[in-house]
Image (tube, grey):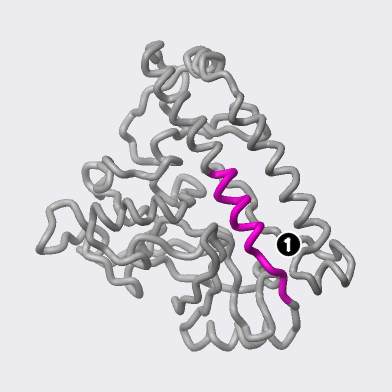
Amino acid sequence: MYLQDRSPYMENSGSSNDRNSGKTEYQLTLIDALKKEIEIARRLDPEKLAAEIKKTGFSCQNCGKCCKRAFGDNRVVLTPQEIEKIQKYTDLSKLEVAGPLIPDISCPEEAGEGEEDRVAENSSIMPEIDEKKTSEPFRTPELLKEDIDPDGNIHAYGWMLRRKRNGDCVFLEKDTNRCRIYPVRPMLCSTYPFYIEGLKLYTCECEGLGVHISAEESRKLAGSLLSRYVSELEDTLAMYEKYEDFERTEKGHEIAKNNLEKGTCIYIVHDSRGITKIID
């Protein structure tokens, strides 16, 4: 599943004055580029996009592969607004719905019998969620070294949909491949396998590609895709504008490793509304 790199950090970017002000030259460049891209994105022709979609062809095969870790990176990025919609629909807490957006470096585990698809007593559509048992295990902070501050907090740049210990989406029904939150599913899910990057249409690997799609469905999908594209750009821009850089030290990396050995990860999640500190 396609995910853009949302990190506003690049090593050795900007001057010391930039860093002292909380923004590096690289971050300021990203902000300027995003503003320009948003302007152009708002003027994209939905009819042309719909024509491209119709030419490509698509029909969901209900295979559930896009929701399963065994078939590739199935992380689903969420905006704060999407998290709230899912919370309202499910009556779950924020951290039961979403977790920090981190690199897909976990190793999926086989869940115990009955664990993968348990259903809460008060709802016929919801899995029984235990964060420690449901979230996939996080193995190492090595690839996140540049995202760790001196206190050992791991900085994440956004949220993603929770996954089971085997890496599958927590809202996927095991036997039917049905989505338990289908009416409020994230924009990424409702527009899959299409995405827009750099003002161009792309597709992810999917068995449903190449299948006939009607002109009406193409227009509907094009509209949703454009809304998603602009929304994601605006959300990323707001995050970058609020983001302040931090120092990276070897001490912080060691603290994070020690925390992990104790079974704890402390995250600072940056999003369009600010920061959230969580212990996962």
Residue 240: within the magenta? Answer: yes
Query: Residue sitting at 55 percent across and 73 percent down?
Result: 268
Image-based side of 277 in relation to 184, left or right = right
Within 10 Å of disc 1 (Cα), the crowding (few <14, some 14-19, many 20+) is some
Give the main secondary structure of the magenta stretch: helix
Residue 105: within the magenta? Answer: no
**118 over 222 or under it: above or below:** below
**Measured from the top left, where is residue 130 in percent x and y?**
28, 71
**71 over 243 or under it: above or below:** above
Instruction: Identify the residue position indicated by label 1 in the image.
Output: 9
Residue, far left: 121
Give, as a three-letter code, the residue at label 1: Tyr
**160 over 51 or under it: above or below:** below
The residue range painted magenta reads 232-246
Image-based side of 147 in relation to 83, left or right = right
Query: Residue sitting at 75 percent across and 78 percent down?
Result: 247
Query: Residue sitting at 75 percent across and 57 percent down?
Result: 27
Q: 235 and 9: which one is in front?
A: 235
